[in-house]
Amino acid sequence: MITVPISAPTLLFAKFTGPTGLTRELRTLVRPGFPYCVIDRRDAYHMGFLQAVMDYGPMHYELPPERLPWMATVTGLFEAPLFTLAEVSVGDLSAKNVVTMAHDLPDVTHIDAILGETFLNNFTVVFDYKKRQLRLE
Amino acid sequence: MGLSLSPVSSEEDVLTIAETTQEYPEEWVVMRVTRRDSSGQPAEGVVLGHDRDKVAVRTKMAREKEFCVFFTGQSPIWVMI
C-alpha cells in the first residue's frame, strides 16, 4: 500500500519503463478521470517511441486513429499519440503494458507526467480528504 | 548552473530530497536514488546533474538507463489538466 499526503496538486514519483528497459522516475500528477497515463514527448522518444516527436509528419499519421485520439480539456482540444510502456510502478505497485500518451505538459506546471486510468485501473485508489491522504493498494 | 554529466556529488554526498531542493533551488535535478521511504518514494540520492532547462537536463542524460528527475521548486497550486 502506498500512502502520500493529499496536497495541491497531489504529486508522487512513479517509474515509467519503456520496451527497451529504459526507466525514468518522474514526479507525476495523480489524475483519476483522465483515461491515460501521460509522459513528456522527449521521454517517450528516448524510450523508443519515435512518433512522439514527429509532429503531424508521415510517421505521426501512420498511427491508426485509435492510437491518435483527440482529448478535450478545460483549455481546449489536442491530439496526441498513444504507445505502450512495458511497466509503470509506484513503490511496490506496478502495472504491465500500460497505454500511455506522449504529450508535453506545460513547463510552468513543473510536472513531468500524469498517472491516469490506464495505471490507476489496476488498483484501489482512495482519496481520503478528511485525513488528507491518498492511498493506493 | 551548467549541467554536469558526472556526479556532482561523490558517493559520500548523498542528499535527501529536502537537501537537494535547498542545494539546487528552482532547478531540474537528475538523481540516482539510494534510499526510499516506506511508500517507495525517493528519500535520498546522489545528484548526477542539474540545470534550469528541463530539456537540456534530459537530453544530456538520454543514454542513462535509469534515473529520477524532478524540479526542486513548487508546482503551482492551480494545476488543472
Image (tube, rainbow, N blue to C red):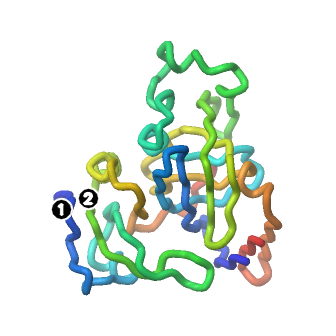
Tell me: B62 left or right of A105: left
**Three-letter code for the amino acid on which mark 1 is drawn:** Met
Q: Is residue B10 visible?
A: yes
Position of residue B6 relative to residue B40, above or below, is: above
Taking B55 as reference, is A75 left or right? right
The residue singled out by tag 1 in the image is B1
Give me the chain letter of mark 1.
Answer: B
Q: Where residue B32 sits in the image (x, y, percent)?
A: 37, 70
Quadrant location of residue A1? Answer: bottom right
In contact (CB < 8 Å): disc 1 and disc 2: yes
- The residue located at (32%, 49%) in the rendering is B63
**Other-residue count near label 2 (Cα within 10 Å), few / some / many at <14 / 14–19 / ≥20:** many
Tag 2's secondary structure?
Answer: strand
Q: Quadrant of residue B70?
A: bottom left
Q: Amino acid at mark 2?
A: Asp
Mark 2, residue position: B51
Instruction: Tell me residue B17's x, y (percent).
Output: 41, 78
The image quadrant of residue B68 is bottom left
A76 and B15: which one is in front? B15
Near-viewer residue (A36 or A107): A36
* Image coordinates for residue A119, horizontal then vertical, percent: 71, 54
Determine whether A79 is above or below B23 in the image.
Answer: above
The residue that appears at 63% across and 34% down in the rendered structure is A82
Q: CA distance from mark 1 to mark 2?
A: 6 Å
Q: Does B78 sit above or below residue A49?
A: below
Q: Give above or below for B26 relative to A96.
A: below
